[in-house]
Each structure stands twice: as structure tokens, then as C-alpha cells.
Amino acid sequence: MQLRVRALETILTEKGYVDPAALDQIVENVETKIGPHIGARVVARAWVDPDFKRRLLEDASAAVNSLAGFDPVAAHLIAVENTPQIHNVVVCTLCSCYPWSVLGLPPVWYKSAPYRSRTVIDPKGVLTEFGVSLPAGTDVRIWDSTAETRFLVVPMRPAGTEGWSEEALAALVTRDSMVGTGLPKPPEDESEAAR
Amino acid sequence: MTNSIHDMGGMHGFGPVTPEPDEPVFHADWEGRVYALQRAMGATGLWTIDGGRASLENLPPLAYLDASYYKRWFLGLERRVVAHGLVGEDEIAAGRALRPGIRLNRKLTADDAKTMSFAHFDRPAPGPARFKASDPVRTKNLHPATHTRLPLYARGKLGTVEAVRGCHVFPDTAALGTGENPQWLYTVVFAGRELWGEAADPAIKVSIEAFEPYLDPA
């Protein structure tokens, strides 16, 4: 593949359609600029600031764009909140739609046939493969990203994190917990950092 | 194509999901280059994001399943630049340009690329929304031979409008290059049992993002 891709890049460059320096910049953006650290900061802010959380659930794009130090996010970001009653999981059965602007590019499993095929019909089985078992009585809500709207799961704040700083909380928020295939790290994992 | 292999929701037989600890953004240099080529060529405005998706869905099913994600993107891009007359089959075979390129309206520069920009797909509404939150709706039983975003598993099903998401570019026409044809978009939620039958877990609900032409009042 390396050779075939290089050949196509050469053709497109020689014909004047692409600039290799622009390609370098695009790769650098997704490898260093965007990623789940952005979503984690958003979630941590929602955990400590009820007014921000309310705005986030009302209009996630506007709420995130109101935070200092963030590049503008995609126009139609929708935040969905996990509660003791409902656990949310995001999938794209048709392709690979994913909230790039807050989570970066999707992992391979998110784009894979097993995840795309089974999440809508057997979500609890899929969650088991991620080591997640929900308490009995929790409803599971699947969001199939079939348009240009994008979904960010706001996981529940772990117990035992009262008084933690926003930064320490953000370290508990995993990528998978914002897709719904994971839960935030337990506070024990990060309590050294929090002290 | 619509009823093709990409529409996977509800299929069995693909095995377990295998998460990869500490996964890198790209697993090889060429994956990053394919990603960047796709973004840079997308910026020329010669095709829509939906046209791009359609070119992946039109891959032969075995090729689609056999290819890794970025290989699929590569195959789609290669087909698209040929189909749009930007590159000749002979040039693909030669691995180099044999003729000068045609003039494009826009070419992405490194400076442009510094700003991560995300396209907007919402558009002014041509008319009032037909549905509102809590309206019961039934998805149409549509099987167009061209691109659509109504998954097979959610056709002909009874659901409820949960939210009105504004008016957006309609993928079904945008993919064909016949215009944006903006349509109202709704989050429509279905009970697991409506989609998967009485044996399904009653604790499951699934929503899709459904464009108004996919819906009938119920």
C-alpha cells in the first residue's frame, strides 16, 4: 500500500491538485492537535459547572465554542448524558461518523464490521467485550450517527471525586467513556495526581 | 448504492469487537497520507462528502470487506479522481502524471490546513418542519439504487420524533451531484423490539438521524 499511495500522491502533486506541505500539515493536525483530551476537558467542565452542563446539553457546539482555548467544533455536536437510568452508546452503522473535533479520529474498532453490525442489535454483548457491565435496570440508548450530527457522551462523574480540580477530573475521562463503550477511570487510578 | 455491504446494522457473523490498547492515530505512514489526500481533494469542492461516501459503498462487496479502513478510502479516492476526469487510468497504471492537470477552483495550501475547519451542513429551511418532538412516525420502506442514509434495519419501522435538528444538506441528492436540496432532520427513536422483534431486550432503544423524506406520519 505504501507504494500505491505514494504513486497516487505523486500523480496528484504533479498535476497540481495537492500541495505536499498541506498534506503534512493535515497529518500533523490529527496526530497532535485534536484528540480525546479535548472532549475530556469538556466533560470535566460539565462535572464542575452545572450552568455549563446545562448549556452543553442544550447546544453542545455553542457551549464548547464558548470555552477559551478551544478551536471551533463541528456545527452539530450533540451531548448526551449518562444517568443511573440510561447509558448512551454512539455508533455509525453506515460508515465511520464520529465527533472528530472533540475526540480526534476514531479508533479502528469503531470503524470495524463487528462494532458497526452488532451495537444496534446487541449493545450489551458489545459492552461486555469492552469489559463494561451495567447495573441491572439500566436502559441502553444507541445513537446511530446517520447524518452530520455528532454525538458526545457525558459519562457520570465517579463517586469519591468531590473537591477534585477540573484538570484532575479530566484525567479520569477516557475516550471510550465519551463514546459509551467505557466508563471513566475510578478515582483510585488518578488519586496520586489529584493530591 | 443503498442495499450494499456498508449497511451493516444488525448483521451477524463478524465476530467480537477487538479494542486495541494505546492505539496510534495511524498504523502506517500511508494511512496518514491517504487521510490527508482525502481531506485535500475534498477541499477542491469537486465532490460532496456524500459523493465520497457513495464511492466507498459502490466498491464490490468483497473488496469492501477485505480492505482496511484507509485502504477503502484509498480505493474510493482512486476511483473518484478517475471518474471526475482528474487523472487518467493510464496515469494510475504508470504511477506518475502523463499530462498536465486540469485547472481547479480551489487548492488547499499548508496555511489553509493550519486551521482545522469542519464543514457545516445546516442550511436555511425552505419551509416549515412537518414533524415536532413526540410525533409518532413510520420510516418509509425505501430501496433506492443510489446513496441514502436510512439504514436497512430502520426501514418501515414505527418510531417517535425525539428532536428536530434543523435543516441540512440532503445526502440522497448531494451524493448524485444534483444539489443540496436541504431537508429537515430529526432524531427518531425506536424501541429495540420494534427493530428486532419480541425476543429483543426491552431495555434497548436505538435512534437514527432521519431526514424528512424518510418519514411518514404514523
Image (cartoon, coloured by chain):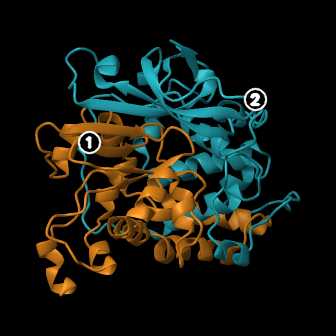
Chain colours: A orange, B cyan
Determine the image quadrant of residue B144.
Answer: top right
Image side of residue A88 versus residue A76, left or right: left
Q: CA distance from mark 2 to mark 1?
A: 35 Å
- Mark 1: secondary structure: strand
What residue appears at the point 20 percent right and 26 percent down from the top-left corner?
B201
What residue appears at the point 67 percent right and 40 percent down from the top-left corner?
B168
Q: Amino acid at mark 1?
A: Ile
Please indicate, yes or no, whether residue A8 appears anywhere in the rendered image.
no
Q: Does residue A127 sit above or below A32 in this rendering?
A: above
Pick the front one: A143 or A97? A143
Q: Amino acid at mark 2?
A: Gly
- Kindly identify which numbered label has been placed on residue B127: 2
- Mark 2: secondary structure: loop
- Where does the image place residue B87, in percent across and percent down from the top left? 76, 52
> Which residue bears the numbered disc 1?
A86
Residue under mark 1: which chain is it in? A
- Where does the image place residue A61, in percent across and percent down from the top left? 55, 58
